[in-house]
Amino acid sequence: MGALRWNIAAILEKRDAWVAILAATTVFAFVLNYYGLVRGLSAITPHLFYIPIVIATYWFPRRGVIVTVALAMGYLSMGYVMCYPDVDILTQITARFYVMVAIGVIVASLSGNLKEQEDRYHGIFDYSEAGIFLMMDLRTGFVIEEANQKGAEILGYKTRDLAGMGFQQLCPDEGEMAALRKKLDSRCPVTDYQCHLRRADGSPISVLLAAGPLPDRRMVFTIADITERELAAEALKASKDQYMTTIDAMSDGMYLVDRDLRIVLINSTFRRWLEHAGVEGNILGRGPDQVIPCKSRELCNDLKRVFATGENLVGIDEFLVAERLFMTETRKIPVIEDSRVVRVVVIMRNITRQQQIEEEKRLAYEQIEKNIEQFAILGDHIRNPMQVIVGLADLEGGAIADRIQFQAREIDRTITQLDRGWIESEKIREFIRKYYGIGKR
């Protein structure tokens, strides 16, 4: 029954149908008025002309007045031909003529204003960037009564193809349809309802739907295609996941600080370091001075400097964790947008072992330097007693003295070779001084 009522209403919305009704009511009015004039019933039958007059002036306001005048003139002419010279009847017919014209002009004027308002709001309907659908709420479900061009484009149909189509055909998900029906049964507006519709080619699209009730069991649906937005959101999420996977794979600790000196992002390495240091709770939203066990005031001052100047800073920070000293090379890198530092990336590389190795190298090279200097002094200490021994041997003379002098010369030659090696080792000493800062310059 509801579908039949909707079909009748849809037919009556077409102007061609009203042209046929106008023609039929006009013929009917003339026939009955002719019969009334013949039978003397002219007091009732003229009112039948109001039907075609209202139809003409409502549906065709620009030509309705002309049609009204033509109908009134036809009635006036028929009355004068059939009732002349009856003055009373002719007077009534003339008065009705003016009443018909006046009614036609008034209805045409009101209809014209109504059509202007309708065209104005229909322009909003037609040129909206959102898809708009006028729905009939029937027992069988929602039926599309009218759709704008944008709505047809979103669904891949022509507007005329959507008229009379059930909304269930466009929303194949029964769960989403049932949820929408439940919301609309309360007769309250529905906003930001995300659902999936099916285009004419069968491809699915995601839409954001809004709906509101209208009089006479009608509803207006508004949809916006968010398929591309969802795809972009998924791509952004995938990119973010890949980005997080990348920074989590870093062996260096990393965190991101906003202009309020609050940590907004950390990687897994830095989180493990903090857990090892005994820092508990949520790290995000807290300041570095609250979570990092180091010279926090200097760290915050460095961050403020990066925000103020936009320059990179590199420094060495020391941490005391579980009575063990750790050292990191900390890089503070600004993130600039629109010529303004909006965030700072802090990358911390654990260099504790490297520093220990460097310290061991430095101590070893210092010991080598001392050994070389002591060896040079030792040569002089050996030569002095040897000179005494050679002198005493000369005083004694004889074969033993010759043998002592020979052995002394061998010892001196050996010490001379060692002296030459000490001189060559000066290059090593210069290298030590240059790269490690050990020894006198």
Image (tube, helix red, strand yellow):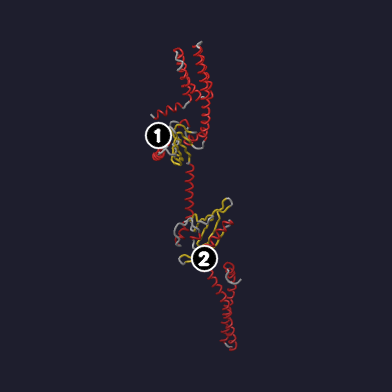
- Residue 27: tell me if it is visible: no
Secondary element type, mark 2: helix
Q: Is 389 situated above or below 371?
A: below
Q: Residue 141: which numbered mark, if any?
A: 1
| Residue 271 located left or right of residue 434 | left
For the C terminus, give its image quadrant.
bottom right
Residue 264 image offset from top left, x and y in percent = 50, 54
- Tell me where residue 335 sits by quadrant: bottom right
- Residue 129: tell me if it is visible: yes
Q: Residue at x 53, y 27 (%)?
A: 112
| Crowd tier of the residue under label 2, counting other residues whose Cα lies within 10 Å: few below 14, some 14–19, many 20 or above | some
For the N terminus, give its image quadrant.
top left
Observer-nearest of 182 and 140: 182
Label 2 is placed on what type of residue?
Gln
Observer-nearest of 100 and 14: 100
Q: CA distance from mark 1 to mark 2?
A: 77 Å
According to the picture, the residue beneath numbered tag 2 turns out to be 355
